[in-house]
Image: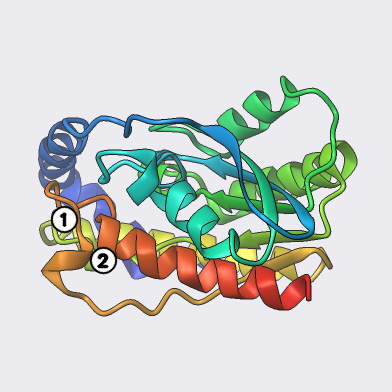
Amino acid sequence: MIAVDQILRVPLLPVLAAQGLLVRRKAQLLPEPTGARRGQSGSGPKLRLLIAGDSSAAGVGAQTQDTALSGQLVTHLAPHFSVDWRVEATTGHITPDTIARLKDLPKQRFDVVVFALGVNDVTRATTSGQFYQRQAKLMALLRARFTPRLILTSGVPKMELFPALPQPLAWVLGQQAARLDRAQAQLAETVPELHRLPLDIPVEPRFAATDGYHPSPAFYQLWARSLGDQIIAHHT
């Protein structure tokens, strides 16, 4: 059954295209943060951590990796583990891009994989069926190549809440994001290692980067804490 927002995309297409172009230009102004994308930190049992995905996994919205998702997650985990970590993420990546990137890594063991994907899949009009199949392919790759005990994601963001998105674009993308999120939730029921965490962060200006599209360091801190608590609980 075709949803209302999908029906209305045709008459709204000129408006949606213009709004999308303006948002894309503004969002692309923010660079990926500087700093190391792999390293070791902390003391205790060894924990091998891979962070993969799109611009949020890369930390866009923060100036350095220390204040991005990777740095704040490692900081949260370091009192409990000796964390051997790396980031494999690029702005604009969709699920097939991440699959291709991870295929280039040597086969190795990661105890935990954290991935952030979905926003670009939404903006490129990926259907829920395509997203399910592509995410299933990603899960198969992660399990076969890296044998993680835990795969973590926070699901597809609620794009209707992004400050940078005007109406009706916010509504249309929000509806599409919800469909892809439901597809991922269905997939999670079939993959024992995959855990999806709710990311219930208040809609406040301080949690958005200057472009109104990417997370701020304050958002990354709360996100990292949520992920880190799940990792600690799973490994203790």
Which residue corresponds to mark 2?
160
Q: Is residue 134 left or right of residue 23?
A: right
* The C terminus: image quadrant: bottom right
**Spot occupied by residue 58 in the image (x, y as percentages of width and height):** 43, 39
Between 26 and 43, the one nearer to me in the picture: 43
How crowded pointer 2 is (Cα within 10 Å; few <14, some 14-19, many 20+) is rated as many
**Spot occupied by residue 128 in the image (x, y as percentages of width and height):** 56, 55
Q: How is the image coloured?
A: rainbow
Which residue corresponds to mark 1?
165
How crowded pointer 1 is (Cα within 10 Å; few <14, some 14-19, many 20+) is rated as many
Whichever of labels 2 and 1 marks the residue nearer the N terminus, that label is 2
Q: Which residue occupies 39% across, 32% down?
A: 91
Q: Amino acid at mark 2?
A: Glu
Q: From this viewpoint, which residue is outermost toward the top?
A: 104
Q: Amino acid at mark 1?
A: Leu
Q: Which structural element holds mark 1?
A: loop
Q: Is residue 9 visible?
A: yes
**103 shown above or below 124:** above
Between 96 and 82, the one nearer to me in the picture: 82
Q: Is residue 87 visible?
A: no
Q: Are marks 2 and 1 in contact (CB under 8 Å)?
A: yes
Q: Is residue 10 left or right of residue 196?
A: left
**213 shown above or below 175:** above
Distance from label 2 to label 1 (Cα)? 7 Å
